[in-house]
Amino acid sequence: MLAGAVMRPSLPEFCSLGALSALKPLRPTNKGIGSMIFWRVKPLDQILQAAAKKSLKRQLGPVQLTLLGIGAIIGTGIFVLTAEAAQKAGPAMMIAFVIAAVVCALAALAYSELASMVPVAGSAYTYTYAVMGEALAWIVGWALVLEYAVAAGAVAVGWSGYANGWLAYVGISLPAALKTGPYDGGLFNLTAFLLALAVTALLVFGTSKSAKVNAVLVSIKVIALTVFIIYAVPAASDVHFQPFMPAGWGSAFSGLGVLGAAASIFFAYVGFDAVSTAAEETKNPNRNVPIALIGSLAVCTVFYLLVGYGAVGVAGAQPLMGPDGIPLIAGTEAFVQACIGSVALVCSKEPLVNVIQSMGMPNLAWWIGTAAVAALPSVVLMMIFGQTRIFFVMSRDGLLPEVFSRIHPKYQTPHVITIITGFAVSIFAALFPVGLLADVSNSGTLFAFMMVAVCVLILRRTQPDRFRPFRTPAAWIVCPLAIIGCFVLFVNLSLKAQVVFVVWAAIGVLVYLAYGYRKSAMAPGNSPR
């Protein structure tokens, strides 16, 4: 299927053939609820023409793009959230890894079809705009702030745990108040704050430079995880997998059990869709975007399962229970107190390092910690990268101020929004704990993934003859399963994360009514930027 896409025309060739002029935009076919949903639909040809008018430079090849995907995926989820997942599900977190991987794979297939059809920046926001209209597109774009910006903060916090451990190993110890944020017993997470600012500066200097740095960092992460697997998997003991499911499957809104762990560990796979946000900066995107999306997800899934098996098998992963026999919620006062003096995996800020240390290999543990310190910034890089490209396109559509889509004359990057986003991420990282940030991020991500799957199905019915360089196989099975899977994981997030999502969406609606509704390029009397 992918091979066949190589023989198809590229986007410039596709446009030059006059195909775009023959494409018919989706219009409301009835009044009432339908017309309210499909309101201000932006035709796909108009999206492509707007992108060509004010576009980013195409400079990323298939290898770079796949590495960007791997760099965005492998990170805090496996290096840090392994402990969080263990506290929610115990050894059964292995099932959680599989559930999250399956849901992401289904979503990736849907993403691949739309990203190859519409190879411009904007990801789920752009796709929704072209299919279901401006109002829903705005909500999706607003929700993507949770996926990218909040996720970047979560990764920075996860990185700080390894960084503080590494600094202590070399004889540098920060005051306790500067190691974690106020919700983790500290005051201000200095290392996480500084990392976010450093990555922001790198992104301002250019996508190509960032991609080259990212390629090196991805190699470091892959090598570190490979070494961990080589040593940990053979040493795994079956005894550490008993009891296998101490918290059961969990229940809606509890955030516990296998499904609760899957909802959290979903964060470990988030990032593959960042590949689609780079479509506008990719050479031959019709072919390379689907390859990078599916390839990066497949590689990371194999690593996750092997690393998870090794960690549980060597160190054990039994959760700390409360007096009611239910696992304590990570990040609460009760959990913090229970972890004092404990060497349990679920209490660790750097779980992979602790697993190797428990095997009596402190030097190897130090090197793995060093690799995490060196490589995790690549995930922060990709998350901020994705967020700025979403805002860039929303600004280009008139839904955000024009200054957000200004491109630096020398570096050819959207520098204004990159700086604003980077500063916001640094504040998130300095003040909030990794578990809360990850769950909040997942809420926005799952909503966006559901919308992408819906868009694929709608386009299959409304524009069946449209050229699709990549077609989602068995779309009427894959996409509904993706929607159901995302919904199940959403309701199994913590109640706090769900409330944050609803409040954030409500704020987004107010912002749209106050600004985007009037300033939109689709509004009467306005013209595309």
Image (tube, helix red, strand yellow):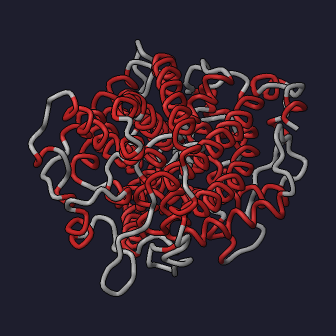
| 479 or 462, nearer to the observer | 479
Image check: 365 left or right of 521?
Answer: left
Q: Which residue extends farthest bottom?
A: 324
Name the spot of residue 221 as percent of width and height, x first: 49, 31
Name the spot of residue 253 as percent of width and height, x first: 46, 78
Quarter occupied by the N terminus: top right
Q: Residue at x 52, y 72 (%)?
A: 243
Image check: 449 left or right of 81?
Answer: right
The quarter of the picture where residue 460 lies is: bottom right
| 104 or 395, nearer to the observer | 104
Name the spot of residue 486 as percent of width and height, x first: 61, 65
Name the spot of residue 135 as percent of width and height, x first: 54, 61
Whether residue 517 appears in this view of the structure is no
Q: Which residue extends farthest top?
A: 410
Q: Residue at x 47, y 70 (%)?
A: 493
Seen in the picture, residue 324 relative to 99 is either above or below; the reply is: below
| 452 or 295, nearer to the observer | 295
The quarter of the picture where residue 9 lies is: top right
Q: Residue at x 41, y 29 (%)?
A: 371
Q: Residue at x 27, y 69 (%)?
A: 335
The quarter of the picture where residue 332 lies is: bottom left
Seen in the picture, residue 367 relative to 46 is either above or below; the reply is: above
Seen in the picture, residue 426 relative to 508 is either above or below; the reply is: above
Image check: 517 left or right of 343?
Answer: right
